[in-house]
Amino acid sequence: MILRELTSLQLYLALVAGGAGLLGFLASLPTMGSAPLLAGFFALATLSLVRLTLPFSLWLDGFLAVFGAVALVATLPSGAAMPLHHWLALVSAWAFAWLFVERLSGAIRSGTLPESGIGLLIPIIFGLALLVAWEVITRGANVPPVLLPPPSSIWARMTAEVPTLWADFVQTFVKSVLPGYAIGCLAGLIVAIAVDRSPFLKAGVLPIGNFMSALPIIGIAPIMVMWFGFDWQSKAAVVVAMTFFPMLVNTVAGLNAASAIERDLMHTYAANYWQTLMKLRLPAAGPFIFNALKINSTLALIGAIVAEFFGTPIVGMGFRISTGVGRLAIDLVWAEIAVAAVAGSAFYGVIALIERGVTFWHPSVRGGRA
């Protein structure tokens, strides 16, 4: 019932905005060369009620969403305020995209469509809809680029600054994030095993770990720069400090995930501590360990970028962001943010793929089936 109400609301928004936009379009009669695109979208949006009787209504919704986005971007006025029917077209295209994603997710849940492959359309359509709305709003409302540049300007800056962005990526991600991530996660894992082995360490190290994890990064970063210098070593040290304690806490919790029955079974097999650890407790802690690895994949990048604000060679994502803000080169700042977002998402995705291969036995990987 809730899904039907949502679908009706989305369809209502799409039809009303499309019909009103068509009337506004006919009344204003713009003379832009790409105006037929927008007129065609308004006509299809108004007449799309017939799609209720068509078997391919799901894909028609997706086509209308894409067609509306293309028509909007192609007919955006330059240097002038966007007329009302363009705003109505944005509402209509967004509603069709919303309707398409909702219907597609429902078809996947019901088993009508396979999740593999087609399921990727949901985040892709959602992300593209956000980018189109961002582009249309910033250009249509004449938002000053110093406040928020449109995605097209950010992309143009990215293509023009490829060597600079690559050098910053290598300095921040390859030289600082990866070594600090590996050292911090490995140290957290080893200390967690030692804490599990020793009740004294469990009572002493964990409270200190909770205390250290609450320290602000802006307080740690200058100290690390003073200790290890201005190059990548100080940024890697900040990453180690940020990734160590999430790995420690999650691994300690995961080592206690094995049930008492499973431990008793290992005891009946005359297994010692290390055999039980390697064959039972560490595999049972696998989901917890990978959870920490995924959390740390984003924390490491954030820590390295923030650490570069407090001293670095004239290269690096954090350095470029701080200097770009000072020079009001906001498009370059957003280009660095985009590179960092893509790198962090790719890093997270690699860890998630490894997790699916290693913890294939876990119900969360097998779709919740025990």
Image (cartoon, helix red, strand yellow):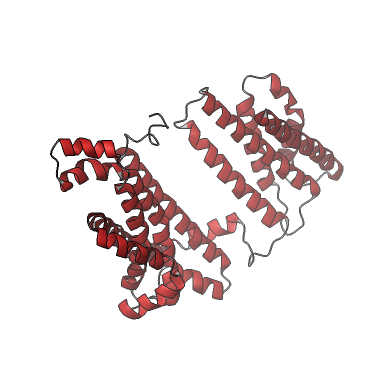
Residue pushed farthest left?
Answer: 270
Residue 180 position within the rendered picture, expressed as x and y whole percent measured from the top left: 32, 63
The image shows residue 20, relative to residue 130, as above or below, that is above
- Please identify the quarter of the rendering in which residue 3 is found: top right
Q: Tell me, yes or no, if residue 314 can be seen here.
A: no
Residue 52 position within the rendered picture, expressed as x and y whole percent measured from the top left: 70, 22
Q: Residue drawn 35% across and 75% down?
A: 224
Instruction: Classify residue 251 as left or right of residue 68.
Output: left
Instruction: Classify residue 65 as left or right of residue 334.
Output: right
Residue pushed farthest right?
Answer: 27
173 or 37: which is nearer to us? 173
Residue 346 position within the rendered picture, expressed as x and y whole percent measured from the top left: 41, 50
Q: Tell me, yes or no, if residue 28 can be seen here.
A: yes
> Which image quarter is the C terminus in?
top left
The image shows residue 142, relative to residue 126, as above or below, that is below
Instruction: Classify residue 137 as left or right of residue 307.
Output: right
312 or 107: which is nearer to us? 107
Residue 64 position within the rendered picture, expressed as x and y whole percent measured from the top left: 66, 34
Q: Residue drawn 44% across and 31% down?
A: 116
